[in-house]
Amino acid sequence: MLVVGLTGGIATGKSTVSSLLKSRHELPIVDADILARDAIAPGSSGFRKVVDHFGADRILNSDGSLNRSALGDIIFRDPNERQFLNSVIHPAVRRMMFMAVLKAWIRGEWCIVLDVPLLIEAGLWKWVGEVMVVYVSEKLQLRRLLDRPPLPGNEPLTESQAKDRVRSQMPVADKLAYATTVIENSGTLTDLESQVDRAVAKWREQQGGKSGWWWKLCWLVPPVGLIAGWICLLRTHVRAKRVRKRTRGEVERRGVEMQDTKQA
């Protein structure tokens, strides 16, 4: 079974791509945002940890529910607070994702998509067979974020708040180094649909075309699937080394440019 990691940045259109993968190609989607909400839902151990840490007066509404807007303002401004929240959410999300993938494999699905905003940052990209990155420029990200209608009961984002949200994440341009498939989402919906269709066609071909002979073989003969999984992990390890080398080269190049600028 092919496991695809779908990622991007805030306001890049990742959710639209996710819905196209589900509606046009009937692929099962595991939405990490939904799992993250479940991880700190009222009554959960995650909820209690978050309230104890941040304080009920800062992040709870009058009815005792979580004020996500207030929590967002805190974590987008403070990397340490964001790290704490991630330390509560990420382990629970990983467990739920593993169970979702296992259930999909038992059902005989040929592919499953993990929709994870922090796929790269959390290191989960190393455990998937394909990495799909939805890309737009930071300028377009910011404009789309400011154009979004606010959630009920919340005020519209200011430009400063929008910039905090965009810059709290790894730049989408940096995620491209990890991608096996890039979806460029600054065009029309028709163009977006075409890109998604081509990506799924490529994945199907990798899994044995329309007959799906390869994934069926891996499903029916577990040792074959296990060997295929190890090969996939080995390929990912090689790709990781290339990414580190490329990233290191980019950092060194930027350092030289900064030195040249200072000397000038």
Image (cartoon, grey):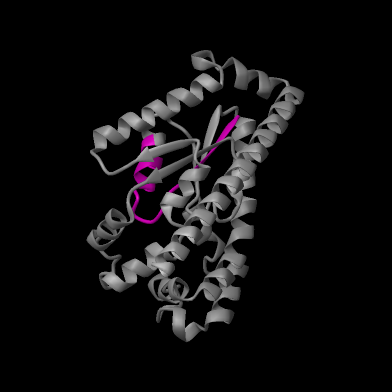
Q: 18 above or below 142?
A: above
- Side (left or right) of 185 relative to 81: left
- Side (left or right) of 155 relative to 21: left
**Residue visible at 41% across and 35% down?**
21
Image: magenta residue range = 1-20
Where residue 43 sits, quadrant-wise, is bottom right
Please tell me whether residue 18 belongs to the stretch shown in magenta: yes
**Residue visible at 54% across and 22% down?**
206
User: Residue 120: x and y, percent?
Assistant: 54, 51
**Residue visible at 23% across and 38% down?**
188
**From this viewpoint, is residue 99 visible?**
no
Which of 93/243 is in front? 243
Q: 253 above or below 66?
A: above
What is the tally of numbered marks visible in this picture?
Answer: 0
Residue at the far right in the pictured view: 223
User: Residue 61: x and y, percent?
Assistant: 41, 78
**Residue visible at 38% across and 62% down?**
166
**From this viewpoint, is residue 86 visible?**
yes
| Quadrant the N terminus occupies | top right
User: Residue 185: x and y, percent?
Assistant: 31, 42
Where residue 125 sits, quadrant-wise, is top right
Please tell me whether residue 143 belongs to the stretch shown in magenta: no
- Side (left or right) of 202 relative to 125: left
| Quadrant the C terminus occupies | bottom left
- Side (left or right) of 126 relative to 186: right
User: Residue 103: x and y, percent?
Assistant: 62, 38
